[in-house]
Amino acid sequence: MVNPGAFRGSRKEFLMGEKAAYSAGMAGGYDADALALIQRRYFKRYPVDLPHHEEPTAEHLAAVDDDAPEPEPEEPDLDAMTQEECEAATKELDKRQTILKFRRAVSCSCLLLMLITNVAIVSSKSNVGWHIST
């Protein structure tokens, strides 16, 4: 069975819709800024806490405001927690930060390849890396 690619559904539609913005950024010499804006818009629509295999609801996508500032994540009140609760909350924050770093790195690499070329990016069955399928 053929791997459908790293980005599917509305994620792929969103990224393909950003090709013009990225091309304009490259032509204007501000490609890093254009990429950062695309990532910011991507994470507003597809939050870190949303698994890759789940699509956001139409209501969520319709409610996205690209001009609104990002809400700061709530910091746990360590003084009001037990030791076990503190450790669990800290682990959860660390896990979220790790996922965010990974997704930004993967999305940056895949986004660049997807936007620069018109190809599908798929992972190999052996999970040893990425290859390009035209």
Image (tube, helix red, strand yellow):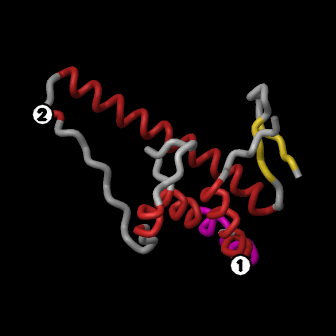
Look at the picture and state if 86 lies above or below 49.
Answer: above
Tell me which numbered mark, 2 or 1, is placed earlier along the sequence.
1
Q: Position of residue 124 (x, y in %)?
A: 79, 33
Residue drawn at (53%, 51%) of the image: 55
The magenta span reads: 25-35
Q: Position of residue 127 (x, y in %)?
A: 74, 28
Q: How many marks?
A: 2
Identify the secondary structure beneath mark 1: helix
- Residue 79 placement, left or right of 55: left
Residue hosting label 2:
79
Identify the secondary structure beneath mark 2: helix
Amino acid type of the residue tagged 2 in the rendering: Asp
Look at the picture and state if 43 lies above or below 69.
Answer: above
Residue drawn at (60%, 68%) of the image: 33
Magenta-colored stretch includes residue 45: no
Residue drawn at (66%, 63%) of the image: 13
Magenta-colored stretch includes residue 26: yes
Residue hosting label 1:
28
